[in-house]
Image: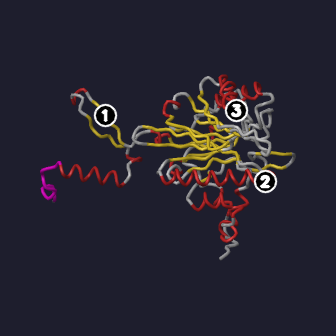
Amino acid sequence: MTDNNFNYDSFVRNPPNPIDIENLTLQDSLFSSQCISPLPPNSFNISSLNINGLKTHSQSKIEQLHNFFSLKQIFFGGVVDTHLHPKQMHFLSKRLFNYTVFSSSLDISQHVRSSGGVSLFIENSLAPHVHTYISHSSHLLSVELYFKGNIKLRIFVVYIPPTSDQALRDTTIDLLIQALSDTKRLGFHHAICGDFNMHLDQFYPIFFNQPQIASKRIHRLFNFLLSSGYVDFTPVNSSASLGTFRHADVITRIDYIWSCPLLKSFLLTSIIFNACDSSLSDHNPVITYFDSSLLCSSVKLACARQLKRRTRCIFLLDSVSPALWDDFSAHIDTLCNIPPSTFAS
């Protein structure tokens, strides 16, 4: 049944953020050097930017990318449409000495219009947590990180070609859906950042009011994401005059950072930064912030000298699942020789 009174704007745009974002300097230009934008407290972030190729003006673009990462304190920086081989990307990335880069392969075959090339820059303090990375194709990369407490985070970087290269577009979408299905089945926290070359705002009315059309092959990626509980946090400053892509007088939002059902509970906010004052790209970077408690273990072993190096469990209340607490309670009950009725009033 169609609900013509459904408020799409209130759905697409998020509820009030749980943090104060006034200090994020929403109106600052991308490379403002007046000050370094403060991070939301106790947070990490993921950014996404289509850099429109690095074969030309590569040194200038890399320098601007370095400035962006430094000024905005980026933890995970997804960069797509580089048009570079991994070795070329590794060489250029030496300018970003605070980051470790992981890059996809590059398809240079004649029948491909979009050679692609996607990379993920990881701040050096987090790079040691990388377990593995996979170049699924020249348009899709995933990097897997392990943290204490059996926390596994997988970040996908994707560039979906435009409709002018429909065959490669279809292949990339199918490959991404399969990779996400496998990752979700394994129980990983994961995020997808990149240029999707499709308009989510136009799909929402179809998804809610016309499920038969939403399930058609042409809409399969957004339909899969929304049906599976993934969330794209609409940037708080997104507007008719500020999107992630601009061409002539047309401003749209086609670059996204999606969070899986496990990760979305850690979402804080999302911001678009205006790059119109640079020659970096005709895309604006988007940054999504997450609660950094994700990267901390829900159960840690603490050693104390007074315990003579014996260990004890310390629980982070916000990260303890009901199942984990039930197991802990049952274990404590078995260790306690005093029946509970002793303490009953």
| Viewer-closest of 41 and 215 | 215
Judged from the image, the secondary structure of the residue bearing numbered disc 2 is helix
Where is residue 129? Give x, y as percent.
48, 33
Please report contact status of discs 3 and 2: CB closer than 8 Å, yes or no.
Answer: no
Q: Quadrant of the N terminus?
A: bottom right
Name the amino acid, label 1: Ala
Applied colour scheme: secondary structure
Mark 3 or mark 1, earlier in chain: 3
| Viewer-closest of 244 and 162 | 162
Where is residue 32? Give x, y as percent.
72, 30
Please report contact status of discs 2 and 1: CB closer than 8 Å, yes or no.
Answer: no
Judged from the image, the secondary structure of the residue bearing numbered disc 1 is strand
Q: Residue at x 79, y 40 (%)?
A: 282
Give how far apart the Cα atoms at labels 3 and 1 are.
Answer: 45 Å
* Residue indicated by mark 3: 85
- For the record, the magenta segment spans 335-344
